[in-house]
Amino acid sequence: MSLHVRVRFARGRAPGLSPRSTSRHNTPVQDVTGKERRVGRLAGKTAIVTGGARGIGAHYSRALAAAGARVAVADIEDGAALAAEICAAHGEDAAASLTFDVGDEASVKSLVAATVERFGRIDILVNNAALYAKLAPRNFDEWDVEVWDRVMAINVRGPYLMVRHVAPHMIAQNSGKIINIASGAAYKGVPRMLPYVTSKGAMLAFTRALSRELGPHNIAVNSLSPGYILSDTGLENRTHVEEERIPVRNSRAFRRDGYPEDLVGALVFLASGDSDFVTGQSLVVDGGSVNN
Ligand SMILES: NC(=O)c1ccc[n+]([C@@H]2O[C@H](COP(=O)([O-])OP(=O)(O)OC[C@H]3O[C@@H](n4cnc5c(N)ncnc54)[C@H](O)[C@@H]3O)[C@@H](O)[C@H]2O)c1
């Protein structure tokens, strides 16, 4: 089934905007002609964040915008409220909400075309959309084959489809940053989440191989592997919280919970010029888990 991409050009102040989401680094300033000019490490860059409307992805969208990028909030869920919040904080050109299905190639194609039409270029791709928070843990022999296939379609084929349609734009520019969200679960071999852990292991290999193909085009391909993170969507899954939270906390060098805010510095680093000689790597951000 093909979902059509709907682009919303969210404008104006959203209700409940947190004062924390503005800073002097991201406030649009006016040049001598009175035109708005964005400042920050990612000024002039455009980012697509898949799964960027909810969970950890929403924090990635906010962080990239705060660093100066224009952000396409691309999700199967409606990201209009988040795009409005970002535009209110960082200027009316700072974000657009696009709904799409990462598992569907026609939908991915439309998303990429709509992003280029709206922002003129794509510099940063964050492959974050995945089936995770909604998955109920179970033993290896209890997974429906249909669920296994769906996880692979979203978590593995999805990032591939994104790269297939975004990379030509980056190749034409001779620059780009691709960040694949993997998981500490792939290093640990977390039990009772076999299709998910397998899909995230695939992201590590995908990153390594793709970095070698895209390196000659000056495109960096890295992965970011979060440890167990208490995101709003993650907290909705009580089984994950019950099975993971305390054992994970006790396995860490830093004996505390991980939050989306713990990831955004690493993400912006991988998206920025500060990491220009880094490619094919996986950056694990998990509070120093001793099981890695
Ligand atoms: N939460 C954690 O502890 C944790 C740990 C390691 C890695 N991760 C990874 O981080 C990323 C975000 O995790 P999260 O906790 O926010 O999970 P989540 O499941 O809440 O978020 C996934 C996002 O992807 C979107 N999405 C799902 N299917 C889609 C589709 N077909 N097309 C487009 N968008 C779709 C969802 O709407 C959501 O916004 C995922 O890649 C996840 O595997 C999470």
Image (cartoon, rainbow, N blue to C red):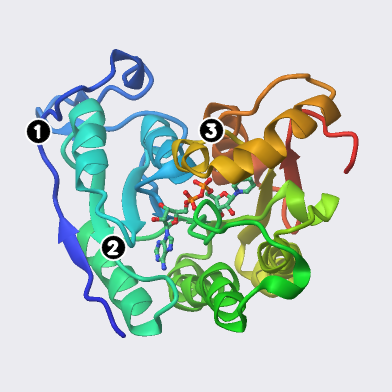
Quadrant for the C terminus in the image:
top right
Q: Which residue is mark 1?
A: 12
Tell whether circle 3 marks a residue whose Cβ is less than 8 angstroms from ligand 1: yes
| Residue 260 disc label | 3
Q: Is residue 114 visible?
A: yes
Mark 2, ligand 1, within 8 Å: the answer is no
Residue 265 in the image: above or below residue 140: above
Real-space Cα distance between discs 3 and 1? 26 Å
Q: Amino acid at mark 2?
A: Thr
Find residue 255 and report its image quarter: top right
Q: Is residue 256 above or below residue 70?
A: above
As helix, strand or loop, the secondary structure at mark 3 comes to helix
For label 2, the residue is 115
Q: Closer to the camera: disc 3 or disc 1?
A: 3
46 vs 219: above or below: above
Within 10 Å of disc 1 (Cα), the crowding (few <14, some 14-19, many 20+) is some
| Image-quadrant location for residue 218 | bottom right
Give the residue type that dot 1 points to.
Answer: Gly
Q: Amino acid at mark 3?
A: Pro
Residue located at (14% from left, 26% from top): 15
| Sequence-earlier tag: 2 or 3 | 2
Give coordinates of residue 194: x percent, y percent: 73, 65
Q: Residue at x 82, y 25 (%)?
A: 250
